[in-house]
Image (spheres, helix red, strand yellow):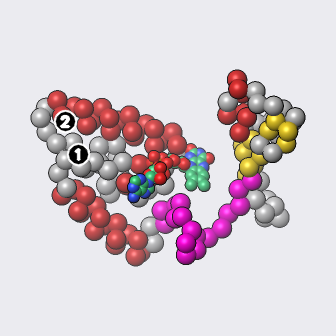
Amino acid sequence: MRPGCRDAQGCAVMNYPDAGVPFTRISEHRHFAPWEDPPGTLLLREYAQGCGPGDPPFYPLRLTGDQRRLDRYLTRARAARGVSFLGRLGTYRYLDMDVSIAEALQAGAAVAASLRQGQPPAAFPGGGGT
Ligand SMILES: Cc1cc2nc3c(=O)[nH]c(=O)nc-3n(C[C@H](O)[C@H](O)[C@H](O)COP(=O)(O)OP(=O)(O)OC[C@H]3O[C@@H](n4cnc5c(N)ncnc54)[C@H](O)[C@@H]3O)c2cc1C
């Protein structure tokens, strides 16, 4: 936090791909909502690390064992009539924000259309399931 500072890096996200820099990017959140003009600025540095025991598993890896478990999960999900699975968690895929939102909108329209026809919604109405 830098009280009094109105702009530390001039943009929302600056990437640092150099091997000698320990963090991968710096986000300065005030640039995401410039109309709010807070009286200081907040810089967030992100450091890459492997996922260890007790860490939240943020990224789907799809290693061989993961893929086998996913296949079992997809089979059960497709058989569960009237339940829909969405998003990163529900489809076990890496999704960027824009794709998540697009798929949520697509799923909303698809679920509504199914219900209008008296049909249960699809298991994966936004995408995924493969
Ligand atoms: C470190 C990191 C950096 C990222 N950077 C970017 C970026 O720069 N640009 C970009 O476009 N995207 C980025 N993303 C991806 C972006 O965050 C996702 O695309 C988006 O958040 C996915 O939305 P979602 O709703 O599918 O999943 P999430 O946002 O993960 O929502 C899933 C929700 O389910 C809840 N939940 C989990 N388990 C349960 C349970 N058992 N019961 C009930 N609720 C539960 C969780 O608490 C969470 O609120 C980043 C992700 C990470 C982790």
Q: Does dot 2 land on a helix, a strand or a loop?
A: helix
Residue 89 x/y as whole percent? 42, 55
Q: Judge whether residue 55 is colored magenta.
A: yes
* Mark 2: amino acid: Ser
| Highlighted magenta segment, given as a residue range | 45-61
* Mark 1: amino acid: Ala
Residue 114 got which mark?
2
Which quadrant would residue 14 be assigned to in this image?
top right
The answer, for residue 52, to whether it is visible in the render is yes
Say few, some or many: other residues with alpha carbon within 10 Å of mark 2 (under 14 / 14 to 19 / 20 or more): some
Residue drawn 82% across the image and 36% down it: 40
Above/below status of 128 relative to 99: below
Residue 78 x/y as whole percent? 22, 56
Q: Quadrant of the N terminus?
A: top right
Residue 126 x/y as whole percent? 34, 43
> Which residue sits furthest left?
118
> Which residue is disc 1 drawn over?
122
Which quadrant would residue 112 be assigned to in this image?
top left
Taking 113 as reference, is 3 left or right? right
Taking 88 as reference, is 50 left or right? right
Q: Quadrant of the C terminus?
A: bottom left
Residue drawn 18% across the image and 58% down it: 79
Q: Is the CB of the residue bearing disc 2 within 8 angstroms of ligand 1?
A: no
Q: Judge whether residue 54 is colored magenta.
A: yes
